[in-house]
Image: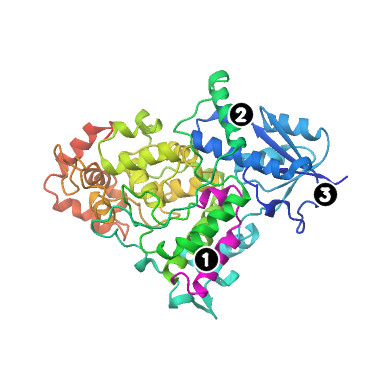
C-alpha cells in the first residue's frame, strides 16, 4: 500500500497531490487533520477560521474515500488516529512551528516545498551571490522574471521598463466615490459552510474558544473551482483597471480593482505560475495594459515570493528584532477591532473593513493600520500577531517579514531602506477619507490635529538620532527644525497615548 500523504490546511490545491519530484503517488491515501488547538491558542478572526475550515472540508469532500479526515485536539493526536505507526509524507510546511512539528515526528518524511515559483535552494544561491549587499526586492524581481521568462520581449522587459510604478500610483479620480469597476467574484455558501458555522458557534459556546470580527457571508473562495472562477473573473474583467489605482483608497469602494486572490494563493487553491501566466496572456492578447499586468505580476512573482524566502532566509531570530525599541502593548480597542471607537475616518474605515471582512488592501495595511502602530510605538511582535490573526490571508510567513521588516521597520533596515509612515497629507492625496473627518491633515496641534500628521512628527522626533543619517529620511528629519510647535506636538501625542484617535 502506498505511503499516506498529509495535507496541511494551506496545501489544498491539485499541485499538492501531483506525483513527480518526490510528490505522493496517485494511489496514496490522504490524511487531513483539523486541530482545535490552533484556534484555542490564539484569538483568530472568525471569518478566517470559517474560511480555513470550509476550504479544508471542501477539499476533503472532493477527495472522497481517498482521504482520512480527522478532527482532533492536536496534530499529534490526529496523526496517531489517522495512521497509527504508519509512515507519512508531507510537503514542507509554511511556518517554522509546523516544520518543527513534522521534523520531530517519527516516520514522517518532509518533501520540498510546493506552491511557490522559486525553490529554496535557488533563492539561497541568488542571495549568496549578492555578497554583503542588501537583498533588494527589485533585484530579486528582475531575476525571477528572467528565470521564468515572465513579461519579457526577448531579453527586454515588456513595455520597455521593469517597473511601472510611475503609472500605478495615481490618486483616485477627483470626486469619485467608486471606480465603477465590474464586481469581483463572490462565492455562494453551501451546506459545508453551514456546518462550519454551527461548529464555530459550538466551540465558542461550549469550549471557550474565542474569535474576533464578524463572520459571513463568506467572501473568499473555499474550493479550487471557486478560486479558478475568481481568477478568471479578475483577469477577464478587472485586471485592465488594476494598475493605475492600486494604491488608492475610497471609503465607498474598499475593493477597487484588487484581485482578492491572496487568500486563495495562500490556501494553495491557486498556483502562482497559473496566475501570472494568465495575466501575461491577457496582455499579449491586448486585453489588459502592460502597467496593470506588471503591477499584478510584481505582487505575486516579486513581492509574494520575496517575502516567502526572506521568512526562511532571515532565520528564527528575525521575529525578535526591535530596532526602534517599541514595546507598547496594543490597546484593547485595536485588538477588539472596535472601529466605532475611532474618530479618525481613515483608521476607522480600515478597522471596520478588517472587522467585517478580515481583509483590506495593501495600502490600508501599510499606510493606515501599520503606520499608526509604528507612530505609536507598539510592540512589533504584537503587531505581527495581530495581522496574522485578523486577516484571512495572514500566515506567519506572510506577516513576519511584511510587518517586522516593512511596516514596523523593526529590523532597522535589513529589508527596506526607510520606515513606511507619513503624515495625513499622504492619506489626503491618495483617498477621499479626509473629507468629512473631524481632523485636518494640515494641522499638527489642537482639537483638529490629524493623528497621522502629529504622529509622524512625534515619531521623527523620537527617532531623530537613528534616522538623520538615513539618506531617504534625512530631509524629513531636518524638517523638525522648521517646525515652530514641535515641542507642543510631542507633548500632545504623549498625552494622547493609546486612546482611540
**Mark 2 → mark 1, Cα distance in angstroms:** 39 Å
The mark nearer the N terminus, 2 or 1, is 2
Q: Bounds of the magenta span?
A: 261-289
Quarter containing the C terminus: top left
Q: Earlier in the sequence, mark 3 or mark 2?
A: 3
Identify the residue at image location x=56%, y=50%: 264
Q: Residues within 10 Å of mark 2 (few under 14, many from 20)?
A: few
First in sequence: mark 3 vs mark 1: 3
Which of discs 2 and 1 lies nearer the camera? The answer is 1
User: Distance between the Cα atoms at labels 3 and 1?
Assistant: 34 Å
Residue 84: x percent and y percent? 81, 32
Residue corresponding to mark 3: 27
Furthest residue toward left: 484
Badge 1: how crowded within 10 Å, few (<14), some, or many (20+)? many
x and y percentages locating residue 24 in the rendered image: 78, 51
User: What residue would you read off at disc 1?
Assistant: 279
For mark 2, what is the residue? 37
283 vs 408: above or below: below
Secondary structure that dominates the magenta span: helix
Q: Which secondary structure, mark 1? A: helix
Any part of residue 163 in sight: no
Q: Is residue 18 left or right of residue 480?
A: right
Question: Which residue lies at the image location 80% right of the left edge and 35% below the top edge?
Answer: 83
Q: Nearer the viewer, residue 111 or 352?
A: 352
Amino acid at each position: 500500500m502506498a505511503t499516506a500523504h498529509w495535507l496541511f490546511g494551506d496545501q489544498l490545491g491539485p499541485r499538492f497531490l501531483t506525483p513527480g519530484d518526490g510528490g505522493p503517488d496517485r494511489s496514496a491515501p490522504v490524511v487531513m487533520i483539523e486541530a482545535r488547538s490552533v484556534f484555542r491558542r490564539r484569538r483568530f478572526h472568525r471569518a478566517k477560521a470559517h474560511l480555513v475550515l470550509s476550504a479544508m472540508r471542501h477539499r476533503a469532500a472532493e477527495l472522497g474515500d481517498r482521504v482520512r479526515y480527522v478532527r482532533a485536539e492536536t496534530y499529534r493526536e490526529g496523526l496517531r488516529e489517522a495512521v497509527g505507526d504508519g509512515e507519512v509524507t508531507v510537503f514542507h510546511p509554511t511556518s517554522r512551528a509546523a516544520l518543527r512539528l513534522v521534523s520531530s515526528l517519527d516516520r514522517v518524511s518532509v518533501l520540498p516545498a510546493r506552491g511557490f515559483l522559486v525553490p529554496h535552494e535557488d533563492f539561497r544561491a541568488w542571495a549568496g551571490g549578492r555578497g554583503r549587499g542588501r537583498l533588494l526586492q527589485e533585484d530579486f524581481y528582475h531575476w525571477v522574471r528572467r528565470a521564468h521568462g515572465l513579461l519579457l520581449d526577448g531579453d527586454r522587459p515588456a513595455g520597455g521598463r521593469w517597473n511601472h510604478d510611475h503609472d500605478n500610483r495615481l490618486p483616485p479620480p477627483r470626486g469619485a466615490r467608486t471606480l465603477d469597476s465590474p464586481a469581483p467574484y463572490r462565492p455562494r455558501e453551501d451546506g459545508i459552510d453551514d456546518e462550519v458555522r454551527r461548529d464555530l458557534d459550538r466551540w465558542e459556546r461550549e469550549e471557550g474558544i474565542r474569535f474576533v470580527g464578524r463572520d459571513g457571508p463568506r467572501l473568499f473562495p473555499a474550493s479550487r473551482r471557486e478560486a479558478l472562477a475568481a481568477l478568471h473573473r479578475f483577469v477577464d474583467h478587472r485586471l485592465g483597471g488594476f494598475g493605475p489605482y492600486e494604491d488608492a483608497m475610497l471609503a465607498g469602494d474598499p475593493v477597487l480593482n484588487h484581485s482578492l486572490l491572496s487568500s486563495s494563493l495562500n490556501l494553495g487553491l491557486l498556483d502562482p505560475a497559473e496566475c501570472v501566466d494568465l495575466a501575461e496572456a491577457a496582455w499579449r492578447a491586448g486585453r489588459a495594459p502592460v502597467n496593470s499586468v506588471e503591477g499584478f505580476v510584481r505582487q505575486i512573482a516579486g513581492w509574494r515570493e520575496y517575502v516567502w524566502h526572506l521568512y526562511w532566509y532571515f532565520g528564527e531570530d528575525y521575529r525578535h528584532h526591535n530596532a526602534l525599541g517599541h514595546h507598547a502593548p496594543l490597546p484593547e480597542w485595536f485588538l477588539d477591532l472596535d472601529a466605532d471607537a475611532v474618530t479618525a475616518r481613515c483608521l476607522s474605515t480600515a478597522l471596520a473593513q478588517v472587522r467585517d471582512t478580515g481583509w483590506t488592501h495593501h495600502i490600508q495595511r501599510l499606510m493606515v493600520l501599520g503606520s499608526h502602530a509604528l507612530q505609536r510605538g507598539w510592540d512589533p511582535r504584537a503587531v505581527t500577531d495581530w495581522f496574522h490573526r485578523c486577516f484571512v490571508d495572514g500566515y506567519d510567513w506572510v506577516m513576519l517579514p511584511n510587518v517586522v521588516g516593512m511596516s514596523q521597520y523593526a529590523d532597522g533596515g535589513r529589508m527596506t531602506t526607510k520606515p513606511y509612515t507619513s503624515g495625513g497629507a499622504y492619506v489626503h492625496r491618495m483617498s477621499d477619507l479626509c473629507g468629512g473627518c473631524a481632523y485636518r491633515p494640515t494641522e499638527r496641534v489642537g482639537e483638529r490635529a490629524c493623528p497621522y500628521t502629529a504622529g509622524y512628527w512625534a515619531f521623527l522626533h523620537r527617532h531623530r538620532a537613528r534616522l538623520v543619517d538615513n539618506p531617504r529620511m534625512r530631509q524629513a528629519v531636518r524638517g523638525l527644525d522648521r517646525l515652530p510647535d514641535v515641542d507642543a506636538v510631542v507633548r500632545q501625542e504623549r498625552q494622547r497615548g493609546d486612546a482611540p484617535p
